């Protein structure tokens, strides 16, 4: 079940229970004015659903553990660090994964062996395939030594810990700036381990 479907199902259940409770309170009125009650119940159901959905979305946005629960295995938000190999040389990078219930965006920066920034990239709407443990996306790369923006494609295998959280990406990237495939490894930094 996708995270959005999961949240909508929960909100639908809460809204339905609330409307049924309200109907129970006005059951005597319903017996004599069924058409008015039918129209009112439609309006009230829609209003309750929208109200509870807004509350759930706001809470999930503000409370990380609830967002993590709602997204389940689709939760990737956080800081990822790693390295990739180009022509036998390693470049280190960090990526910031920012996530809402609907989308994931990634911003990254790579450094050379002298800790000098060499390129940045951004990724919008990566595809996460839970059953195949695949993480794929297109990216825009800006190398500091070139005035051009480079487009590329990446595919990685997702590694899960015992709690079914993603903690490692192992894959490759190809673009029109570097020749051949660039292999990379990313590890999610768990801030809880360092507190």
Image: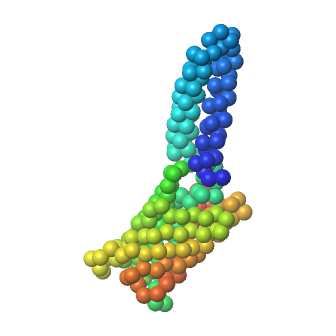
Give the colouring mode of the picture: rainbow
Where 157 falls versus 74 (above or below)? below
Residue at 54 percent of width and 25 percent of height: 43
Residue at 62 percent of width and 53 percent of height: 2
Where 83 falls versus 41 (above or below)? below
Where 65 falls versus 139 (above or below)? above
Q: Is residue 162 left or right of residue 12?
A: right
Residue at 57 percent of width and 63 percent of height: 128
| Quadrant, the C terminus | bottom right
Where 129 falls versus 182 (above or below)? above
Residue 79, given in percent of the width and then of the height, sits at: 51, 63
Q: Residue furthest right?
A: 162
Residue at 39 percent of width and 70 percent of height: 140
Q: Out of 170 and 27, give the one closest to the viewer.
A: 27
Residue 175, given in percent of the width and then of the height, sits at: 42, 79
Q: Residue furthest bottom?
A: 88
Q: Residue furthest left?
A: 147
Q: Out of 183 and 126, give the one closest to the viewer.
A: 126
Determine if residue 68 is in view.
Answer: no
Q: Is residue 60 left or right of residue 116?
A: right
Residue 17, given in percent of the width and then of the height, sits at: 67, 29
Residue 185, given in percent of the width and then of the height, sits at: 55, 76
Q: How many numbered marks, from 0 up?
A: 0
Determine if residue 172 is in view.
Answer: yes
Which quarter of the picture shows residue 124? bottom left
Q: Is residue 58 left or right of residue 10?
A: left
């Amino acid at each position: 079940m996708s995270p959005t479907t999961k949240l909508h199902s929960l909100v639908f259940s809460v809204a339905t229970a609330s409307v049924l409770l309200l109907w129970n309170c006005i059951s005597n009125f319903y017996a004599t004015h069924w058409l008015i009650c039918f129209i009112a119940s439609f309006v009230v159901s829609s209003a309750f659903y929208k109200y509870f959905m807004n509350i759930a979305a706001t809470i999930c946005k503000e409370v990380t553990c609830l967002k993590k629960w709602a997204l389940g295995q689709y939760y990737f938000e956080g800081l990822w660090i790693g390295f990739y190999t180009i022509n036998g040389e390693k470049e280190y990078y960090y990526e910031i994964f920012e996530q809402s219930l609907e989308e994931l965006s990634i911003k990254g920066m790579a450094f050379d062996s002298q800790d000098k920034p060499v390129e940045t990239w951004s990724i919008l709407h990566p595809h996460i395939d839970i059953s195949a443990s695949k993480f794929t996306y297109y990216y825009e790369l800006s190398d500091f030594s070139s005035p051009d923006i480079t487009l590329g494609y990446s595919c990685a295998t997702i590694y899960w810990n015992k709690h079914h959280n993603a903690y490692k990406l192992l894959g490759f990237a190809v673009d029109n700036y570097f020749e051949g495939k660039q292999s990379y490894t990313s590890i999610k930094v768990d801030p809880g381990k360092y507190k």
